[in-house]
Image: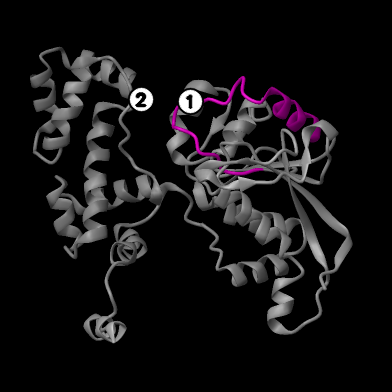
Amino acid sequence: MDKKSPSAVEALIVAVPETAGSALYGMIDVLASTGQIWQQLVGRESSGHLIKPRIVSLSVAPFVCGHGIPIHPDVGLQSDPSADIVILPEMWLAPDDDMRGRYPELLDWIRRRYKSGSSIYSACSGSILLAASGLLAGREATSHWGYEDLFRTSYPDVHFRAEPNLAFADSAGRIVTAGGTTSWHDLAIHIISRYCSPGEALRIAKVYLLKWHSEGQLPYASLVRRQSHADSVVRSCEDWLEDHYCEPGVLASAVDRAKIPERTLKRRFKTATGATLIQYIQNLRLEEAKRLLETETFPIEDISNRIGYENIAFFRRLFRRSTGLTPGQYRRMFRPVADANKLPAYADTSTSMSALGR
């Protein structure tokens, strides 16, 4: 029979209809297993639950969240619940989906909890809700790299960083934001290490095969993201560059084709896309390099030449600055993902299928 430690850390995990069920229930499972699951697996006595997670929502009425996953809140905001930890998990939001003005009573509760001494944690798009509360104003934060433009336009007072897996908004660590979708793994490890022990965090990571993303988000981020704008000249330039970015003299050709002065094109391009024209060309080339590293076995020198860089040293520096990895490190990290559909050499599918038919 499970024991509950009288000193268990209280954690409230926020759930709303936009919440991603996998992140919500994954966090609950991992935190609730502290002090329990490793001990059971190795035959040691359980020390009782070290963290007690509960679901908090607008009310205790059941509802469904993203992808129709049912939610049964443990507590509603009406009772003004308190806890040591408040966690805002990932939500299913579009890249331009602003949370300001949505759930005002929830935003008020988050602010009260922080003022009362709770530590506030967010994972992935949960940081958008945290930004809407105003608690990130003037502070450093991260989220999924796909929301960088949303933070730039809707929350310009937040010091957004797309590269880290965790960002600490204050020196006391009372507001911590985590990056992409599975960054709740990193957040859970951090919470367990802080509130239980580093040893317990390591044990839980081993049980659930949780990976600490020390490489950050840069290797995963798309360098080219089309912006919504009304500049037809810039849009035509973007379309043309997608087919010609590897060509020698592509910058001069793009300017000639636009039929406007070079300085004017560069200014309008930066205004419309948020990137300089040369940055955009470099990013297109690097995205193609990433694709080739993921799917082909070409030597890195050949890839550099294919995307328009004869200077291999320059290509390596540019690649590392943009992804946080060398081309070789990137290939080792992502090539196995591209090969995940391949069966082992010893697998005989014909035999297996015929056996199923007997």
Observer-nearest of 130 and 312: 130
- Colour theme: one colour
Q: In this image, 76 relative to 209: left or right?
A: right
Question: Mark 2 sits on what residue?
Answer: 274
Q: In which quarter of the image is residue 245?
A: top left
Q: Is residue 339 above or below residue 154?
A: below
Considering depth in this image, is 99 or 127 the residue closer to the camera?
Answer: 99
Mark linked to residue 269: none
Quadrant containing the N terminus is: bottom right
Is any atom of residue 313 visible in this view? no
Identified by mark 2, the residue type is Gly
Residue, disc 1: 152
Q: Estimate how packed mark 1 is, as few (under 14), some (14 to 19) or many (20 or more) residues with alpha carbons within 10 Å.
A: some
Q: What residue type is labelled 1?
A: Arg
Residue displayed at 20% across by 15% down:
232
Earlier-in-chain disc, 2 versus 1: 1
Secondary structure beneath dot 2 equals loop
Q: What residue appears at the point 34 percent right and 42 percent down from the top-left corner?
A: 222
Residue lying at the far right of the rendered structure: 6
Q: Quick check: is 109 in the magenta stretch?
A: yes
Residue 173: horizontal and vertical position, in percent? 72, 44
**Residue 47, quarter of the rendered image:** bottom right
Q: Is mark 1 on a helix, strand or loop?
A: helix
Q: What stretch is highlighted in magenta?
A: 88-114
Q: Nearer the viewer, residue 205 or 272?
A: 205
